[in-house]
Amino acid sequence: MSVLAAGGMMPLTTRAAISTPFTFDLEPPMTAREAFVEWMVNNRGEDRHFLGQRWDRLQAMVEHKDVWDDVVKRAFLLTPREEFVQKVNRSHSYDHNFLDIGYGVTISGPHLVGRMTNSLEIKQGDKVLEIGTGSGFQSSFLAHLTDKCYSIEIIKPLAERTRGVYDELIGRGYSEFQNITTKNADGYYGWEEFAPFDKIIVTCGIDHVPPPLLKQLQPQGVMLVPIGPPGAQRVLKIIKGVEADGSTHIARTDIYNGRIVPFVPFKKLDGDKISGTHNT
Amino acid sequence: MQDVRELNSGARLYIAVGLLAGAVIALQIAVMRIFAAGNWAHFGSFIVSIAMLGVGISSTVMCVRQPWFERHWRRIASAALLAFGPIAVAANLIAQQFPFNAIFLIADDSQKWRLAGNFVLYLLPFFTGSLFLGTVFLKTRQQFARIYFADLAGCGLCGLATLGGMWLYAPEHLLLIPLMLWLAAGVAWAWTIASRRVLFGLLVAGALAWSGQTWLADSLALTRLAVSEYKGVSYAQRFPDAQRVYERATPFGHLEIYASSYLHFAPGLSDNAALNLPEMPDNAYLGLYIDGDGPIGIIRDLPASQTAYFDYLPTALPFALKQDADVFVVQFGGGLSTASALNKGARSVTVADSNPAVLNAFRHDAGLREFTGDILAKPRVKVVAQDGRIFLSNTDERYDVVDLSLADSAGLSNPGGFAIAEKYNYTTEAMRTYMRALKNGGVLAVTLWNKEEPPKSVLRLYATMVAAAREMGEPDLERCFYVVSSYLSTATVLYRRGGFSDEEVATLKARTRALSFDEIQAPGSQVDAHAADDVMAAYRAQIFGKLPASGDASIPDDSSAATEPGAESADDDMGAETGDAPTVMPSIALARAAWAALLANQWQPFADTYVYDLHALTNQRPYFAAYLRPASLPGVLDRLDLLQDEWGYLLVWATLIIACCAGAILIALPALFGWRGLLARCPGKVGTLLYFACLGAGYIMVEVVLISHFILALSNATVSATVLITGMLVFSGFGSLCAERYLDSARRVMPYIFIAIAVLLIGYGLFIDRALDVVGSLPYGWRLPCCFLLILPPAFLMGMPMPTGMTWLARLGKEQMFLWAWGVNGCMSVIGAALVPLLATSFGLSSALVLAGLLYLVALPAFRALLRPMLPASAA
């Protein structure tokens, strides 16, 4: 708890225990906001206010074509993003923007995380390696898609803080976060012990794609690497293909297929009327 | 009350004014250095520029309450002077406890308040400094030329002293220099007015300020310089095994070198390295950080068994054609290109670097020499301690390979955006120099980061290199270039003098395939210049297109449900948004079409239709920045999240807009308060304001633009700034002194002075590049006096109009106009300084000189308005 407190990551106020633990066939209502919020309050004991924001943000992500698979939409709806941002920023948990989490690290905005996650096309049982645990939100999102998430963080106090967040949430009944295995190490070398991986997601900057990671990527595997500084970032998508003659071929694209996607503020509705945006 | 004549007597007053003016400029430099090291340099320039409006505010206040200031001048000047030191220290300490973070400026409203808070805090010491100077100017207005000489000469010489002090003090301690100058100014002032009370006050204020900056800050663990967690050096410091192995404070930047097993460099490494290499070498690099930015990788002296990965770097490409080569490395940086050339069996490697602090570290630090195998002392290596571009333009030596690869850092840590910095190593003139320095059949290899989408820098590079080759008179340009890139990584342009042979092209194609790089241009390529028209249109639509109308992005109905992978939306010209990637990425198709347009001499229509400005870099417009055309700005204000790498450019616009608004208010206030009073009896008000506005904007524009120009000859921005600040201000000071002789005949003499200034400035605008090229060819010891000689004529003459105008206002009894004019001059200085980069990026550096010349011409008729005598009181 002290690690969390030092990092401004105090857990939200104590709530009712989670009555419905996560399973991969868990199906919260996904067609109506009120039904979703009610179901989550009753089954997961989460905060009604944040649940509403989460639902609204998902609609914007869908509209913006940042998520398109139902399984990813469901994963987003089940992930309590507010638990992974700093206390001071908690009211901005579902804003579009990236947020500071200390140590010169940001938690990416939900649109980017959604786009990256859906681009990976993770199937249940896939082995996924994350380089740069950071806030822990990306792995927690992934943990609703597969039971084999591995995450490495280079900054020791951040690694410890985020591990603390996972453990605290597991203690509260978020059993899905048991799917995440973490360690504090240099992610450049991957995680040989659990290699090869079906998908690798890098969430920190480097001037080249680390060869050890490419080696630990399965044939036909996909790797995402952010390029450039926060705010002016592209996400490189690497596909380790196999040719007809058995040789390996590495192809580079990006998760937006080279498109430039300006952020579209999405409007907050009060009944039928627009009452501002969700980003102010 | 002390007699004005008494205050005017003796050198003590001039010393006090000179030292305090020097302290103000030293504070300006110190704050800019603090921001460069802790945050991002262009935010420092932004804050200091705006804070300099302190001059405008103090003059406005004085103008409105002029009689009060006349009566209490002694107390006011003393209090303002005594307050300067403690306020400077307190403002910096408070600001550094609440630093703002540039990357959250858009996302986090509190950051905007922090930025505003920084501005207000740093404005305070400039305000008090200006209040002192303004009060003294007011009391000595009849002798303004002499006091102005002291002001200018003090600024120039103290600026020089501050830059020298950077050898002694790291940025966090640099504030001690303005404190020392302030203390000395305080002693001189107490002596001038013979006041023991002021001397005692100075002792108290000095103790407060000095202890605040040193002991108090240490005791309370207050940071004097908050380094952003997002600066490159902050990341290095967090690595568990990080050790700082080198640190030096220099005017060329604060150098720090860190060792850590967590540092990995292989800029532009081919992905195929992973498939073919058993492993990458461990602990192969140190990280070099200059002012906290970086890292620049310093490579270890690797055994041959660990250097196989060099083959997978883009820097190795020219060596597929050239063995046993004489190589010239234009910028040494961290030594990767040099190590790569040596590894590839180069016969000789000549390396240049214009930053003496970097070369000094590599040559003299025992730890660094051991780590790099004393790379600069290797028998095959020859070091040129100057700009590679200037060396090559003045040597008869010829090379097989000239390399300019990734001269800047890894580009990982610039979330504050990129500053508008002169990149003379990449201009058309520089490229021509490199091409001329090649042996027959030699290869020029230029590698640049290629991380932008849509591409910007690389397209400017392509245009620049083709322009240079065209000027070289290459008969078949298409055969001279071979270009490859790696998506979101690097782009490499190879130019072969005389053109590549078929055999060489085949070799390069094989290497490109082996490295899985994308071929952008090769002799024999058949690409249509219009092949990427749809990509161009799509980029335009995506960046400047209309965002969806409000409300329609809220809660989607069934018809607007997400696009399934593989499906295409109606507006999607680049392949499916969420589906399979296009066969060729848009930016690659665009780059190929760009080369087709360049080689077919159809570049202008191509560039005109692109979303960004793609002009070739020249010595007149040497910038990899300001891609957004000014006319496009209004169309992107609602989507600044797309342009965070243009912060440096956008902040200049912000400075200009804020300075214009603040200036208008400050200029208008005295008019509102004094229109029915004394001002009503001042004829020629508009002309007078115009006169001082022209002088304020014109003078600063010349100073700022010449700093940029003189880098051409002096190779280094710091040296150039030193020479210009010192030369301009000191020579202008002498001009001011000289103006005193012609005060009585000013009506007759000044027109000639204005015309001479205008002719000189316009002439400099047209020919200074050529003169600086000649100066650049001289030994460095000769370049400095030559540069001072070049500065002398305009600077001397430009020192005359201001004191002449001010003294005549005083002689005519226009005291309020006197203060108002001083404020207008200060406000227009800020506006002029912001105008220069905008003019330079749009029209070239010379345009600023020409405009400044025209402003001095406009000042000529305005001067006649200034000389109109006061109306009698009954006429008001």
Image (tube, coloured by chain):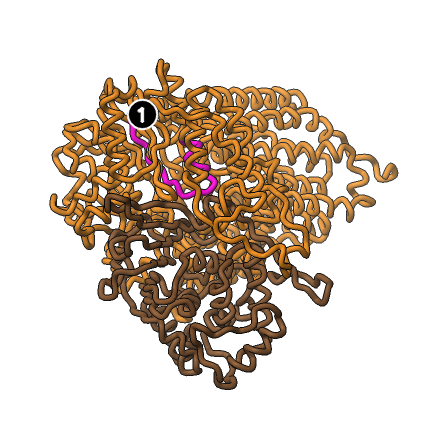
Chain colours: A brown, B orange
- Tell which subunit mark 1 falls on: B
| Quadrant position of the N terminus of chain A in the picture | bottom left
Residue visible at 47% across and 34% down?
B730
Assess whether residue A222 is covered by the magenta stretch: no
Q: Residue at x 39, y 56 (%)?
A: B173
Horizontally, is B7 left or right of B39 in the view? right
Residue B17 percent across, percent down from the top left: 53, 45
Q: Secondary structure at mark 1?
A: strand
Q: Quadrant of residue B557?
A: bottom right
Q: Residue furthest right?
A: B874
Q: Is residue B657 above or below residue B283?
A: above
Residue type at mark 1: give it: Tyr
Please, is residue B836 above or below residue B749 in the view? Answer: below
Give residue B178's position: percent from left, percent from top: 45, 51
The mark total stands at 1
- For residue A37, which quarter of the picture? bottom right
Q: Is residue B458 located in the magenta-colored stretch of the structure?
A: yes
Q: Position of residue A48 (x, y in %)?
A: 59, 77
Give the residue number, with chain letter if any, for mark 1: B495
Is residue B700 in view from this perspective?
no
Q: Which residues are magenta?
A: B444-461
Residue B715 in view (yes/no): yes
In the rendered image, the vertical position of residue B281 relative to residue B427, given as above or below: below
On the picture, is A49 further left or further right than B155?
A: right
